[in-house]
Image (spheres, helix red, strand yellow):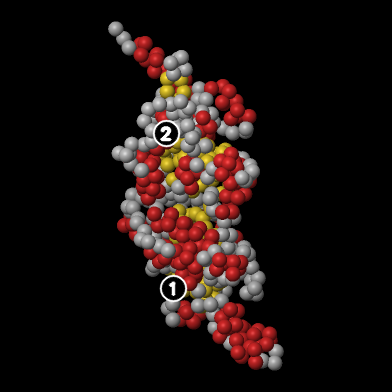
Amino acid sequence: MSWEAEVEEIHRRRERALGMGGPRGLERQQAKGLLNIRQRIDGLADTDSFRELGPSAGASEPDGGFTPANYLVGFARMNGRPCVIGGEDFTVRGGSPNPAGLRKSTYIEELACHYRVPLVRLHEGGGGSVTGAGGKGSGGPVGSSVADRPRFQSVARTLAMVPVATAGLGAVAGLPAARLVASHFAVMSENSQVLVAGPAVVDRALGEGKSKEELGGPEIHARNGVVDVVAADEAGAFELIRQFLSYMPQNVWSLAETDDLGDDADRREEKLISIVPRDRRRAFNMRKIIEAVVDGGVFFEMMRSYGPGQIVGLARLGGQPVGILSNDGRYYAGAMTADGARKVRRLIEICDTFHLPVVSFVDEPGFMIGEAAERLGTIRPGTSAVLAAAECTSPWASVIVRKSYGVAGAAHYGPDAYVLAWPSAEMGPLPLEGGVAVAFRREIEAAEDPEAKRAELEAEMAARLSPFPREESFAMHAVIDPRETRPALCEWIERVRPLLPSLLGPRTFGFRP
């Protein structure tokens, strides 16, 4: 006597689960120009590598119907490396969790932590429902058991153990929105929205008749730092996730893999000798400097539209993944705003968590000043960024390209930093113009021609800002020809690479303001 009948039932259940929200639900998803969750996983993971957990999870109904769990989770490979992938099935209840879906969604972080592999979440869901996970008319226990562990405990643990990358694809509200930002890298597609609450809830509570796009469209969240980058479409979001994870290790107990892009470590880029204007008031394109130095000119920038005076991202030097910090002098002269400080701190903490060396190309005039900056409390997030740098355990190299002033300048130097300077470098406690205005106020006011006197004093002080006296005093490691930047940094990478294994394991951070 065989088990053929039961085996056939297994296949029937699996087939029903593959039907997701049924033909009508799938058609609605397609009509909106959106992929369903199974298509998304197939588009992100290596071909045929996804192994679903709980493929038949759901709820059978008395009439023979079946509602599948509206969350998928399982193992996969991405660029040949194992990971855990999951996401809401919007075709069932708009992604608002049903009982089986809720259990699977809260399991995904535990899975990534247990197997110590990167976690990828693909979000499109409406969060909780007023009717509860069971829907209208459902009976049974209400609320979670007091014995259950807090749902967000595993979310926090995951961030401390493995790389987490997430995507917002469609409408993402409530709990899925919170999980979207609980990541090291978050991307949203141009046709998606991220919301604390949807239009109906907002209108009922506040009387604001706003659309989903007006509340949480991509233009809003690219500028406020909710997401790191906006992708043109879902395929673009998948590619960005793959790129981000290529710089990351599998977990905090392993090192990021090196990748030889075939770029000569001794390459000297001629354009660097003249890229910084001699006129101190003229801006230049710092990204061109970064791209000229890193392997293959490939710079994976994050949060470009948020705190735009600061530049953060990932790259490779000599094949080694590194974090990059810098300034864009075309925004507020590169001054560190409250938002800029938050994004600098975040990049430093990602590098510290996953033991990536940090390279800073410094052009920092200091914290942003003025009434607006004071109202935003710039000094608090700014000081947090400075303390993150001061406590960073990852190897650190700083190349002073132009300005390095004030307390904010300290956010560009980790402990035992390898400090190089270009001939264009200048540094001190205050930027030249402001420092002269403070120190020589009376002398300037008493002059027959105050503006001429100001210019004279500024020229005199500018001569004292040269990096050469600091080199002579061994206040830095060397002043270099800008064309030597890549060879010098690649040599530094070779020196610090043997130190990285000693950093393995979880990092903990003390209180920061």
Say above or below: 384 vs 9: below
Q: Position of residue 482 (x, y in %)?
A: 55, 68
Which residue is rendered at x = 53% and y = 71% of the image? 366
| Residue 102 badge | 2
Q: Mark 2 is on which residue type?
A: Leu
Which residue is rendered at x = 54% and y = 83% of the image? 464
Q: Position of residue 37 (x, y in %)?
A: 51, 32
Q: Position of residue 417 (x, y in %)?
A: 42, 68
Q: Position of residue 267 (x, y in %)?
A: 53, 61
Rounded to the nearest angstrom, the CA distance separating label 1 from label 2 is: 55 Å
Which image quadrant: the N terminus? top left
Q: Earlier in the sequence, mark 1 or mark 2?
A: 2
Q: Are marks 1 and 2 in contact (CB under 8 Å)?
A: no
Identify the residue position indicated by label 1 in the image: 477
Confirm whether residue 485 shows in the render.
no
Which residue ends up furthest to the right in the rendered image? 449
Local crowd at mark 2 within 10 Å, few (<14), some, or many (≥20)? some
Confirm whether residue 185 shows in the render.
yes
Say above or below: 413 vs 348: below
Give 164 or 462, whichever is nearer the viewer: 164
Q: State which quadrant residue 270 falls in.
A: bottom right
Left or right side of 189 for 113: left
Which residue is rendered at x = 44% and y = 28% of the image? 134
Say above or below: 296 vs 209: below
Give 63 or 329, whichever is nearer the viewer: 63
Mark 1 or 2: in front is 2
Q: Secondary structure beneath disc 2?
A: helix
For the image shown, how many numbered marks are present on the structure? 2
